[in-house]
Image: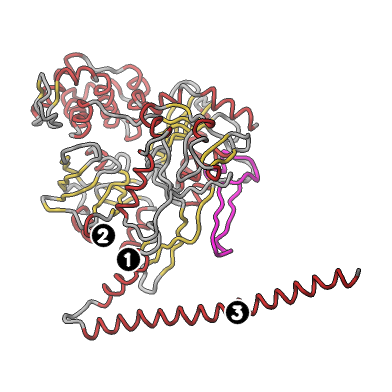
Amino acid sequence: MLRSRFTPILGAGALAMALLVGVQVQDAESASEEMEQVRKIEEAYEYITRSYVEQVDSSELAEAAIEGMLASLDPHSIYISSEEMRRVRESFDASFEGVGIYYEFVEGIEEADTLVVLMPIAGGPSDEAGLQPGDRIVEIDGETAVGIDQDGVQERLKGPRGTSVDIVVERPGYREPLEYSIIRDRIPLNTVIASYMVDDQTGLIKLQRFARTSHDEVRAAIRDLQAQGMERLILDLRGNAGGLLEQAYEISDEFLGSGEMIVYTESRHSSNRRQYRATAGGIYESGPVIVLIDENSASASEIVAGALQDHDRAYLIGRRTFGKGLVQQQFPMTDGSVLQMTVSRYYTPSGRLIQTPYFVGESDEDYFESKRALREEVGLEADLLARGGAVDAGAFGAQVPDSLVFRTDGGRTVFGGGGILPDYIVAVDTLAPALRTVIGKNLDNAFARVDLERRGDAFREQWEDRQRDFVQDFRLSDADFERFLDFVEAEGTPVVTTRPDDDAEDVLVRSEALAVRADIETRIRAFMARRLFSADAFYPVVGQIDPALREAMAHWRDAVTLAQATR
């Protein structure tokens, strides 16, 4: 008996020793092979610098080699030069001067990068001009921007406050390019860009991104709304492309109970396997919550949305999120540049991988195109994107493999496959032709500016310190709308009685404009509110025609049910 117990222990020990020796041999062989490949790179570098027909810039050659290595990994592993790092740090601090956009480069045909707007900074010059997430900047001051690099962006978009830059963008869904003139300005970086009471009991917080002050800003906004009588909260993460993980963790912590998982990471390296759990004392752990998300909600936004959904803490409304679940770590280089490289993957508490599938080494263009295709493929989700509706777990689950079906704390079915699928999908908003023209040409915003000038100081004094009254009571008259149509024509967009055969977007059909008059006027009032009060005054007005917000206000029964179940 003793022998039978002792033998397996001895066998296990011998096996462990054999495995250890094997690992050491394997590691030695692996290290030797790695050094061989390093020497290969060094040899190529020496051949090029010594023998190439022309003089080669050694720093450019080294950076190109680094970028080439990273290109064979995933879409989010990138090289950041020392100058770029300075600008990155600046963007997470207090303020800076410029046109006010967060952007990225998307690789196009023949490696000609296109500059794409991730999101305009709320209240900044680009937001004021009318830029939208997804706009591709193809021309700057009359010269092509296709193939532009980071230095080119700084040289051509940055400039002294008060100077202007003319850009041309291609916008998804628009056949013709759109032209904008942007006046550079100083950009404050508040991340809570709206916080207000939708009605007597509903508060709304719109968080644009996750930067160093986001947690403090959200806490302050919740406290302020609670003081105004808030009993239920809408957290708007639409268009929020992410930011700092620690801020996502701390904000989630305010909604969840002690010990509840917020997010965890998996990696081949144990040091990068981590769990983030909530602590006690969150300031909003029990009230009903609705979270708004869309296809431009990414990374940190997905962590918050996924955690609150998995713990049945919030009812999610909108569209499937972007699906950015790869965790990058910054590895500093001696010259101040950085390798920002993926070291692990994010998982929600139920075990869902946030990252949308990708092919190693695929171009950025293909990566983003595959994401679009995933949302447009035939099936129940595509149908819901077209018409909207609650996600039927039974019907939806029948279309996905068991490996992508997960359960929340309360037993609700949620789905993986990349991104966070909301509980209720809001249909993709297909703008009416008149609205497309007005918004695309920024005519609503421009008219708001000149109309306020026309109304003069007396109008401003009438509404001074009366923002809530303005939101609820001010309306445009029939004469005001006629003035708007006259303004449209004066700005170079013909107002016609019938739409031309070519379905041109550079005209406004009068009957079509009248059909969506309420929406146009609401947007004009929203831009007027921004100028009368503050940048965040825009949202309570435009929220009156927001389909997702309208759905949120119709689904409080679902959110209340979840809140009561988690108490």
262 magenta-colored? yes
Task: Write the residue at 47% across / 35% down.
Answer: 422
- Three-letter amino acid code of the residue under disc 2: Gln
- Residue at 27% x, 49% y is 116
Say if mark 1 contacts mark 3, CB within 8 Å.
Answer: no
Query: Which amino acid type corresponds to the residue marked 1 in the rendered image?
Result: Ser
Find disc 2 in the rendering and name its residue: 150
- Discs 1, 2 touching: Cβ within 8 Å: yes
Q: Position of residue 317 (x, y in %)?
A: 45, 31
Q: Is residue 499 visible to the viewer in this orientation of the structure?
A: yes
Q: Is residue 9 above or below residue 421?
A: below
Foreground residue among 332 and 307? 307
Secondary structure under the numbered disc 3 in the rendered image: helix
> Is residue 441 rendered magenta in the image?
no
User: Which residue is labeled 3 in the image?
Assistant: 24
Badge 3, how many Cα within 10 Å: few under 14, some, many 20+?
few
